[in-house]
Amino acid sequence: MAGKGSCAVLFFLMFISMFSAEFSHSTDTLLSTQSMRDGQKLVSANNTFELGFFSPNSSSNRYLGIWYHQIPEQTIVWTANRDSPITDTSGFLTLSDDGDLMIFDGRGSSSTVASGSGTNNTALTILDSGNLVLRDANNLSRIFWQSFDSPTDTLLPGMKLRRRIRQNQLLTSWKSFDDPASGVFSFGIDPNGTAQLFSWREGNISWASGVWNGREFSLAPDLTESSIMNYEFVTNNDESYFTYHVNESIITRFIIDLLGQIQKMTWLEDTQEWILFWSQPRTQCEVYNRCGAFGVCNDQRSPFCRCLEGFEPASLADSNNADWSQGCIRKTSLQCNETGGEKDAFLGMGHMKFPADPVDLYIGKPEECKIACLNNCSCNAYDFSKGCKLWYGDLKNLRENDTDIGDGTLYLRLAASELASGGTKQMANASELAYGGQKTKKRHLLIIITVATSFTLFILCLLVCYLRIKRRRRGIKRPYEGQPLFTMSNDIAINLGESEDKGGPEFSLFHFSRIADATNNFSAENKLGEGGFGPVYKGQLPEGHEIAVKRLAAHSGQGLVEFKNEVLLIAKLQHRNLVRLLGCCMQGEEKILIYEYMPNKSLDFFLFDAARGALLDWGRRLHIIEGIVQGLLYLHKHSRLRIIHRDMKASNILLDADMNPKISDFGLARIFASNETQANTNRIVGTYGYMSPEYAAEGLFSIKSDVFSFGVLLLEIVSGKRNAGFHQYGNSLNLLGFAWELWKEGKWLELIDPALADECPRHEISRCIHVALMCVQENATDRPTMSDVVSMLAKESSAFPDPKQPGFFTVRIATEGDLPSKMDGSCSPNNLTITFPDGR
């Protein structure tokens, strides 16, 4: 019997091989008389997608999948046999006599991908949408099966992520980088019927989009912020589905990655890379209920999770291993309405993002709201900042932010005994809760001992630094391992941790070896680019945080003065539109700055490129403009120190994962006293094309110098053209002159970036050009302040003063690459005088 079975299998394989020769060229359709062997492929009609066998990365297993045909970086969007791979290249795809789509390996083992419903004449076609369709060869509109109904980890344009009564389609992550088998993360529509998207980890919710309101999701409004994509969330009697559409010329996709992050990515042809435009959850705390019931999450602290005051981990061992799934439990039970005991009390907590699912009561007074909570034994918290809200049962998805105000003050219900001793109102982390039974006095004593010990160690560190500096001055040289980590003056070292937000993340001093490890020893693969003062590298710390490492070149213009400037300034500043400095390293000859990593590079990367610029729709550009304005306003007015940036330009505006702008590169910035209006310097530094006339010619700089630079940048954002290296248009030698001439002639529409011409509101564009021309006026006194700019951009009316002639409007500005890195003496090309310039 075994021999007969083997012969049957061999005969079947020989029969299939007779027809495989017919399928020797690329086509988009497989017929019932054909088979497709490993190495052969189906290619869609417009060469967009292809179907074939592949091995992921370093794996030797073979899978049937779909990927982009013309993208050199193989990007898999669908896998047929993700959980049952073929171990060698003997596999082939065929249509059975019953019309079923089947995969065979060399041993005759088979797996059915799709059923043809008993039809003996089926056809399999790969469409330009990326959809693989099994249909009746005699009636192509009769579809038996399609891959869009069996997604893996990718949602393509036009594909519907569905929820039906008996079926809930999910995107499911890969198991590993080398294994497309089903992973632990999934993404889909809420199976309970609400119009929102969830991601799950092994069945537990890890992220929620919030409810769809017809235009956006309540907790993820930025997901649908794009003029080049149209999003739909449809609910009817038969099903609910989420889908999106985009112009066919744009290659984009949604995926759920290995770590459960939902990502929206777009392919840029000129740079041959995928650009991340949106992702959720972005941080640990955006994972739904990351810290369990009665736990609170804070991205700016380590560990991320803590228990609320009056609570302790349900499992101390798990929480110490960063597993907070069991959450926290009360140390002392509530009295509720029991007689003879003290009534429960409430602890107010600020900087909180409120828990999910409150119950709203129409109560007019805070005291009545409090009593309503006390009278219900299930009520654990209340708030009255926007009406009375009560929370019953476990408090979930609590988030705390040291720098934001949050939703308001959350009043947590505790046993009276927890508050009677005047105990601390700080959150307690797992290591502190190991001593959960200690009294407040012991905690106070521990704090005193800790502070005293820290102060003593700090003094000893300063002494060690002083002795090492003294030895170096005597000519003693040591390798990096033996050199001090920080050699700035003592007053600088003391002030480093004093940011404007006392509760903000602490500034860290990094050892050179740690930075070298994070950047793979400053490898070329990790290099992000070359700045004016040295290369910038991408790195990853052992705990998983991505960082940007600015390694100052020995020959760069930034010496110790600029380095101290950048460290002192950014370490003290906290604003959502300023790049965050995480730490620095001064060891031996090395001067290194460590910043938060910005995945979308800088504004110039998108703005001055035709393909990438098309991705910056007007809404996104206006958002970037508003962010830059707020960042500059903070530096000029709201910071404890008045700061002049002196090098505002497109390449110094970095973009985070959500395309939020962050001002960077403070190496040339200057601090002003609150009563100073301008200063003078003999060392002119900055970037040609962005310098104000009074600064470039006379060395005078003020907040109006930054305003001038902002005006140039605003014109660049509107036009998509550089001021530096601008090609001559008519009689204009630079962008300022071109804009000025068009404005005077009433032809300002010709200035708009062609990528925006069809979709931008003209009144907003006109207002931006008007404001920009006011900012670049030749005389500094005529220019507005950044406060004025905020007001003007916010006004619907454009009844502003007419702008006067801009500075440098008759001067040709060369590109940065055409200029020497340093120039000595006084030069006056094109009637521009620069004294002791140090441009870049």
Image (cartoon, rainbow, N blue to C red):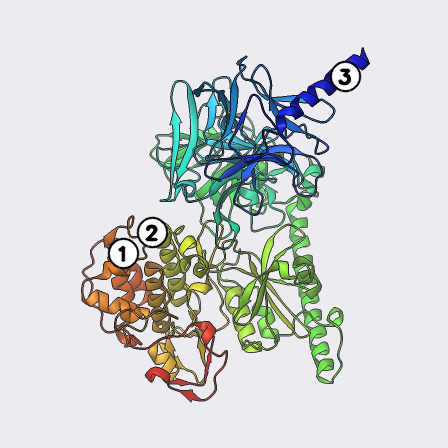
What secondary structure is found at the residue carrying circle 2?
Answer: helix
Q: Position of residue 439 (x, y in %)?
A: 66, 44
Relative side of 425 to 708, left or right: right
The one nearer the camera, 249 or 723, is 249
Instruction: Look at 49% across and 40% down and name the residue there.
Output: 47
The one nearer the camera, 577 or 92, is 92
Residue type at mark 2?
Answer: Trp
Q: Residue furthest bottom?
A: 825
What secondary structure is found at the residue carrying circle 3?
Answer: helix
Instruction: Look at 42% across and 53% down and name the residue there.
Output: 611
Q: Position of residue 437 (x, y in %)?
A: 69, 40
Between the C-alphas of marks 1 and 3, the distance is 76 Å
Between the C-alphas of marks 2 and 3, the distance is 67 Å
Tag in front: 2 or 3: 3
Q: To which quarter of the image does residue 449 belong?
A: bottom right
Q: Which residue is mark 2?
A: 618
How crowded is the residue under tag 1: few (<14 C-alpha within 10 Å), some, or many (20+)? Answer: many
User: Mark number for residue 765?
Assistant: 1
Q: Are marks 2 and 1 in contact (CB under 8 Å)?
A: yes
Compared to 606, does 349 lie above or below?
A: above
Q: Position of residue 456 (x, y in %)?
A: 70, 66
How crowded is the residue under tag 3: few (<14 C-alpha within 10 Å), some, or many (20+)? Answer: few
Q: Position of residue 365 (x, y in %)?
A: 35, 36
Q: Which residue is mark 3?
A: 7
Q: Residue furthest top?
A: 1
What secondary structure is found at the residue carrying circle 1?
Answer: helix
Q: Earlier in the sequence, mark 2 or mark 1?
A: 2
Q: To which quarter of the image does residue 81 belong?
A: top right
Residue type at mark 1?
Answer: Ile
Residue type at mark 3?
Answer: Cys
